[in-house]
């Protein structure tokens, strides 16, 4: 059993969060969980491949992108230590305990640069530092507060036509989601 939450923060557009919670129903099973970005940088020239921060440049345009990431796995609230064999890759191995609550929290930040002289890696790393300091609960709370503020400023009320009211709020949601 379990659930998942994924978001790109409205409070800090460079930050994304993935939270997965689950439990297993059997004891003594060898479990392996891997979190990675296997396709990141595909078709681009690597500029930096560190444990938590990577950057790549497109061949033709000279534009670049950087990703920074952090992942934690907790079993009944206690952190498990991952293997870190490659950049932006975490692997955990453990023996299952029936009913044990498992929580994976992954923070990802992204930055881009349109010029050859700008390095997006420090921007992504700074965003990761900010989001780590908040923790996933703080990232979620800031995201929810930003949405509430945006809804308060952009709500449109149409009386007497629930269908049109729903349609306009749907459009406002998509405009808010897509634009900084």
Image (spheres, grey):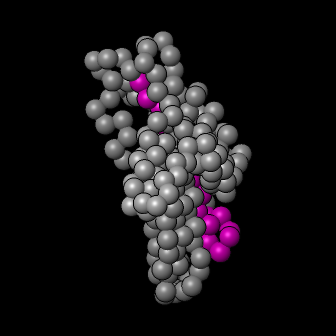
| Image location (x, y in percent) of residue 32 | 45, 68
| Image location (x, y in percent) of residue 1 | 48, 80
Q: Nearer the viewer, residue 84 or 135?
A: 135
Write the residue at 54% across / 70% down: 21
| Image location (x, y in percent) of residue 155 | 55, 48
**Relative to residue 40, is residue 147 drawn left or right?**
right
Q: Which residues are magenta?
A: 64-80
Write the residue at 68% across / 69% down: 78
Depicted 41 relative to depicted 120: above or below: below
Any magenta on residue 163?
A: no
Identity of the residue furthest to the top in this view? 117
The answer to whether one can see residue 109 in this image is yes
Depicted 50 relative to depicted 135: above or below: above
Identity of the residue furthest to the right in this view? 133
Depicted 10 relative to depicted 4: above or below: above
Write the residue at 49% across / 86% down: 25
Count the marks. Answer: 0
Depicted 11 relative to depicted 126: above or below: below
Write the residue at 32% across / 29% down: 44
Q: Nearer the viewer, residue 61 or 102?
A: 61
Any magenta on residue 79?
A: yes
The answer to whether one can see residue 86 in this image is no
Helix, strand or loop: magenta stretch: strand
**Relative to residue 146, is residue 117 drawn left or right?**
left
């Amino acid at each position: 059993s379990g659930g998942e939450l994924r978001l790109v923060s409205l409070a800090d557009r460079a930050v994304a969060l993935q939270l997965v919670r689950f439990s297993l129903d059997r004891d003594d099973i060898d479990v392996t969980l891997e979190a990675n970005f296997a396709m990141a940088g595909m078709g681009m020239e690597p500029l930096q491949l560190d444990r938590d921060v990577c950057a790549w440049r497109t061949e033709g345009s000279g534009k670049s992108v950087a990703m920074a990431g952090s992942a934690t796995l907790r079993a009944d609230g206690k952190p498990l230590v991952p293997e870190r064999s490659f950049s932006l890759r975490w692997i955990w191995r453990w023996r299952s305990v029936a009913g044990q609550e498992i929580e994976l929290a992954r923070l990802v930040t992204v930055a881009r640069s349109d010029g050859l002289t700008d390095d997006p890696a420090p921007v992504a790393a700074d965003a990761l530092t900010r989001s780590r300091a908040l923790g996933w609960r703080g990232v979620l709370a800031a995201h929810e507060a930003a949405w509430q503020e945006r809804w308060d400023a952009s709500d449109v009320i149409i009386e007497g036509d629930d269908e049109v009211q729903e349609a306009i709020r749907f459009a406002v949601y998509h405009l808010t989601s897509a634009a900084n």
